[in-house]
Image (spheres, rainbow, N blue to C red):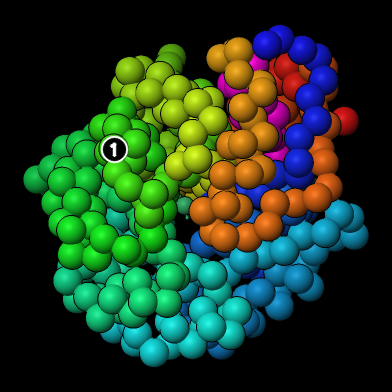
Amino acid sequence: MSRDVITIRRPDDWHVHLRDGDMLAGVLPYTSRVFARAIVMPNLSPPVTHVAAAVAYRERILAALPAGPNFTPLMTAYLTDATDPGEIARGYENGAWVAAKLYPANATTNSAHGVTDIRKIDAVLARMTEIGMPLLMHGEVTDPTVDVFDREAVFLERVLAPLMVRLPSLRIVLEHVTTRAAVKFVEDAGPNLAATITAHHLIINRNALFQGGLRPHLYCLPVAKREEDRQALRRAATSGGAKFFLGTDSAPHPVKDKECDCGCAGIFSAPNALEVYARVFDEENALDKLEAFASVNGAHFYRMPVNRETTTLVRREQDVPREVAMVRPFLAGEKLGWRIA
Ligand code: DOR
Ligand code: ZN
């Protein structure tokens, strides 16, 4: 199906980093003008480990919201070895947060307080299973002997598969999948396992990180993989299948923290993510599946209503700015063939 205009239910972003302070104020408008709801990652410094911290962070987000369409931040808890199951359940039951995020310790940005061994949070996960609270996973092992490009695939084997045997009713989102192996794993599993897919992993493979030189603004975690992996992600996202949905993982870092000796991981896609997804679905001849991926599947998995408002995208060129809020956006300086009407 090729067309020049498409109207879908207003989308949600089921995985975003909004940060805090000045950065929050700078980046939030790009998410809130497009997405009706967003699952907000808790990897602040210090991380959002307690109900009171999630409530306070949500207030800061609401205070930073510009005038414009409605936007609801959906908060998450950051799991640590010391997380108390009672605290997690209390926050879920009183609506302070809707899910808990597992960062394997030291897997990525601000994950030093993450979980060192998943068996240390058995009691938390058992409680989450009982109350139906979703677990969101950064699916990479941190074992330094495992090649960085294999860390997601090894995580499936060593961590996720055994967890699903121990707790088959736990509802899990495998975040930002990057491999063909992960796509197959999710497809083969039952309905309690779903996955988010970023816009950037649909566009770049690992060659892009070295195209003509080192490209720090294309470095994120999990790092982009092979072309065959990118193709598998494209097939999954555009399949319309209920287990895959939109999660940008937009993760802004100031330019100076990306372009330095030890650059941070994270791609800032919020300013144009929906248009990038539209481009991919258009290229895959699957614009009719964009609404399921962007606006329906995630809501169903999270057991929330779909949005009533609509968003229209038109085939019209736009330039991606070089810099937004002191951050280099994804595809900076390039042209995009779609824009939001
Ligand atoms: O690239 C990434 N950036 N991956 C993550 O898991 C975290 C994120 C961040 O917070 O910067
Ligand atoms: Zn993330």
Q: Percent position (x, y) of residue 274?
A: 68, 35
Give the amino acid type for the residue marked by disc 1 in the picture. Asp
- Whether residue 341 appears in this view of the structure is yes
Q: Percent position (x, y) of residue 130?
A: 36, 77
Taking the image as shown, residue 114 lies to the left or right of residue 49, namely: left
Q: Percent position (x, y) of residue 115?
A: 27, 69
**Residue at the spot 82% in from the left edge and 20% down from the top edge:** 5
Give residue 185's quadrant in the image: top left
Query: Height in image: 82 above or below 200?
Result: below
Taking the image as shown, residue 36 lies to the left or right of residue 253, namely: right
Taking the image as shown, residue 44 lies to the left or right of residue 26, namely: left
**Residue at the spot 68% in from the left edge and 11% down from the top edge:** 1
Give residue 180's quadrant in the image: top left
Residue 270 among those drawn in magenta? yes
Q: Residue furthest right?
A: 67
Query: Height in image: 76 above or below 211?
Result: below
Query: Height in image: 211 above or below 191?
Result: above
By secondary structure, the bulk of the magenta-drawn segment is best described as: helix
The image quadrant where one finds the C terminus is: top right
**Residue at the spot 63% in from the left edge and 44% down from the top edge:** 296
What residue sits right under mark 1 in the picture? Answer: 188
Q: Nearer the viewer, residue 158 or 150?
A: 158
Q: Nearer the viewer, residue 87 or 170?
A: 170
Taking the image as shown, residue 4 lies to the left or right of residue 182, namely: right
Q: Percent position (x, y) of residue 312?
A: 83, 32
Q: Secondary structure at mark 1?
A: helix
**Number of other residues with Cα within 10 Å of mark 1, as a class: few under 14, some 14 to 19, many 20 or more:** few
Q: Nearer the viewer, residue 21 or 260?
A: 21
Range covered by the magenta-colored residues: 269-282
Residue 4 among those drawn in magenta? no
